[in-house]
Image: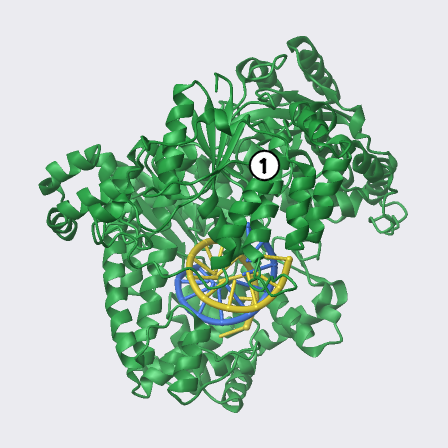
Chain colours: A green, B blue, C yellow
Amino acid sequence: MKKGDHLFLVDGSGYIFRAYHALPPLTRKSDGLPVGAVSGFCNMLWKLMQDARNTDVGIVPTHFAVIFDYSSKTFRNDLYPEYKANRSAPPEDLIPQFGLIRQATRAFNLPCIEMEGFEADDLIATYCRLACEAGGDTTIISSDKDLMQLVGATVGMYDPMKDRQIGVPEVIEKWGVPPEKMVDLQALTGDSVDNVPGVPGIGPKTAAQLLEQFGDLDGLLARAGEIKQDKRRESIIANTDKARVSRQLVTLKNDVPVAEGLDDFVLHAPDGPKLIGFLKTMEFTSLTRRVAEATSTEAGDVQAVAVTVERADSAHGPDVGAGEPVMARNGAEPSESNGTTETPKQGDTPSLLAALRLERAATRKIDISAYQCIRDIATLKAWVAEARETGIAAFDVRATAADPMQAELIGMAMATAPGRAAYIPFSHKSGNGDLLGGGTLENQIPVREALAVLKPLLEDKSVLKIAQNLKYDLVIMSRYGIDVAPFDDTMLISYVLDAGTPHGHGMDALADKWLGHTPLQLKDVTGSGKSSVGFDQVDIDKATAHAAEDADVTLRLWLVLKPRLAAKGLVSVYERLERPLVPVLARMEQRGISVDRQILSRLSGELAQGAARLEEEIYQLIGERINIGSPKQLGDILFGRMGLPGGSKTKTGQWSTSAQLLEDLAAEGHELPRKIVDWRQLTKLKSTYTDALPGFIHPDTKRVHTSYALAATTTGRLSSSDPNLQNIPVRTAEGRKIRTAFIADKGNRLVSADYSQIELRVLAHVAEIPQLRQAFADGADIHAITASEMFNVPVEGMPSEVRRRAKAINFGIIYGISAFGLANQLSIPREEASNYIKKYFERFPGIRDYIEETKAYAREHGFVETIFGRRIHYPDIRSSNPSIRAFNERASINARLQGTAADIIRRAMVRMDEALEKAKLSARMLLQVHDELIFETVDAEVEATIPVVRHVMENAAMPAVSMSVPLHVDARAANNWDEAH
DNA sequence: ACAGAAGCTTA
DNA sequence: GTAAGCTTCTGTT
């Protein structure tokens, strides 16, 4: 082996188990021999070898071996007799397959390596070292964490089933420590599968954090007394020996006296006849056919195949046919149903213009081979000048990640007219690089230089920039020091035009609907599944076709969609409520919020303990260790074996184990359901919040940056994801503790400001209900007033149950009330609920009128509008199916209220930054939770900030709408979100 | 490995 | 009864 050679080591034993479990269990040969795992193994090995020949993917092995465990007894059992002692025997139908899989390996002409007393992992470690010393690189085909300690400059891993390469960054991302510290991490966490003890109570998150703090395991054990948390400190001190022996167990031995040397692993081509012979014996017909095809096209003999391996890049790459589907797509005629059916009215200029532009854009054929690739500054400058000339540039940023806070620029596409588009690659890598990544390709304009030319254009007030989902590009560009303006966003225009229609607002849906065109899919250029690569690995010609097409399509969509805004009277919705919010949200996402790791980690420990205790108690009560998290198992036990009363079935025929039902059983005095409900709460909090949130802390900013979607809901609300910070617990004391982890930086406070009863206020305004308007004007308790009106009870000394029922009705109205739903909510008979509603409408006839008007309007127009003109479509409102129709009616009633409230807070957000700046305040808006805004500001400015925030929020409807009901905002400041809320 | 169901969190 | 997103389990690829 020499420098530049590349060794593939397949973790054969790992492969066997994964193949066995990933495949349907009952694959048998005609004589009954179980061969499912053998089949999976052969398929994977074949795919791996085919993929490996594809030099586009980047790695061509020169050496190849498959490594197996020899037996279960190894030197580790001498160190620690319990090692792997809890391993049950392999499944019966897997046992005969071990030998077959070794034979399969030989049939593939691959070395089959194993050694008594050592695990496959030790042999892999040894060969990695030998390869490294010889100057070669190694790829380990496995995803086993036990092997991650070997990853480094010359050693990478590859998971063939997930098609994922695992290098140093991936190890750090997954485990929070670099590969060389994996041993220490595993020593702390242990491994229940292999029976490595570790330190009880220390999981991967805690271990990573401790190792970061103390450097390594020895440092940690030596200074364990410094750990603040009592339980953790005591556990580590008490289990020092276990940690040490665990480290020995997980440390791979890289000096096994191996019999075969690397030179024995030189890769030979598959011996077609030999392999086919084996596969036929196994009755793997489809793989036999594939192998036969692959080998016969190369003249069917060993020599010819061997040549193919050497020159796979020239003639047999997987992309030979790439031009064909492209042409086919291109040649397709635009679909008939693309909006041209709408006939423009006489004299309706915007409509006419819309139709004309649509006609032009849609009929002009999209030719993705016509796009230019810009590879020198002079050409780039010419394109920039052209965009200045036309005053319009659609652009599309290509970056390394879907998360704009983590993404690095790879290139950018721009379009100045339909069909006239170009791609500027900045940092594409060579296709045949190894795991370390190929070198940057020649003839690209480096990011800095390209951005220096592009920045004046992107910031030019006289050039409109157009993008699809512009917030993503905005966040990235902002990180590169560019403030893109002015701009339009085709996704948002579509959202304003068509919220609620069945098509989405993504580029593919829009291209299909408006242009009758299907753009190249990302996976068509990056490869799907098997051979997918980062966009920076994509061949520049293909990258150009894809990225430039997106810019071209975006421009065409803008030409079609923008005029429709005016035609439908939706310009102001777009310009007041949508577009200006984009940079506001981009800034909020970039700022992020501080989350205290320590608090979450402590909570996580507490929750784990609580859950474990409940688990034991539950097992005691049912006398069996079932999976409590499985509603199926739980239902079978509770209502089947234990025969608890009141069981009901879900629509799939399973026993329902909903919290409501379990609560009812608990109320009847059953002990078990209570514990299950409690267990669910604890595990929910742990898995969704305390365990998940730390993973979202950005490595550089140390803050959590959520992502807001502007066009995700039908009503105009925002949504939050990755992580969702709009559903952080608040109702229970236990859950609220999670909010204490959301903190202000030192010297700062969090300010939370939320609208009080905004949707009911909107209802009182739009439905013109005198009693409710008066109640809100008086600052009265709205639910108590409602109850008082309905039941003729004075507000003073009102029983809480009476108020509770009125409150449920008020909420019910907002949700488009039904007797069924109200009955459910209040656990009362439907008759009774029906009477409540009747009585409510007698007292508040305006609300019944409002509901009927809304339904009639929706039925007539197919949409409803908020008071600011946002349009929400309900295409199924005329459905002949009564339950679908009723659902759409309720949703449309709700949409006017929820959507208006969403519009109001949007208006507040759009104005907020300027208002703060004008007041010379440094407060920064961080989060939005539908009716709440969270800010961070320096201590000294808290008192001055609150009135400004309140003023902007309470007057947000003005001047567009002067509400007949005052808006009220509660605001307070504290060090954490729990206390501020 | 992925999709859907069930369940639970928020406004 | 409205609007969302995330995790776990389960059956199927």
- The reply to whether residue A485 is in sight is no
Residue A282 in the image: above or below residue A470: below
Q: Give the residue displayed 75% in from the left and 35% down from the top.
A: A300
SS for callout 1:
loop
Is A234 left or right of A583, judged from the image as shown?
left
Q: Give the residue displayed 19% in from the left and 44% down from the top.
A: A245
Q: Position of residue A537 (x, y in %)?
A: 59, 27
Q: Nearer the viewer, residue A823 or A354?
A: A823
Residue A638 in the image: above or below residue A626: below
Q: Position of residue A573 (x, y in %)?
A: 63, 47
* Residue A254 image-quadrant placement: top left
Q: Nearer the viewer, residue A795 or A108?
A: A108
Q: Position of residue A652 (x, y in %)?
A: 57, 76
Residue A276 in the image: above or below residue A676: above
> Residue furthest toward the top?
A378
* Residue A935 image-quadrant placement: top left
The chain that hosts pointer 1 is: A
Is A1 left or right of A240, judged from the image as shown?
right
> Residue furthest toward the left?
A225
* Residue A625 image-quadrant placement: bottom left
Residue A599 in the image: above or below residue A259: below
Q: How many marks?
A: 1
Q: Which quadrant of the rendered structure holds the C terminus of chain A?
A: bottom left
- The reply to whether residue A753 is in sight is yes
Q: Position of residue A36 (x, y in %)?
A: 57, 57
> Residue furthest toward the right?
A346
Q: Nearer the viewer, residue A373 or A27?
A: A27
Residue that label 1 marks: A109
Q: Give the residue displayed 61% in from the left and 67% down from the top.
A: A891
- Amino acid marked by disc 1: Asn
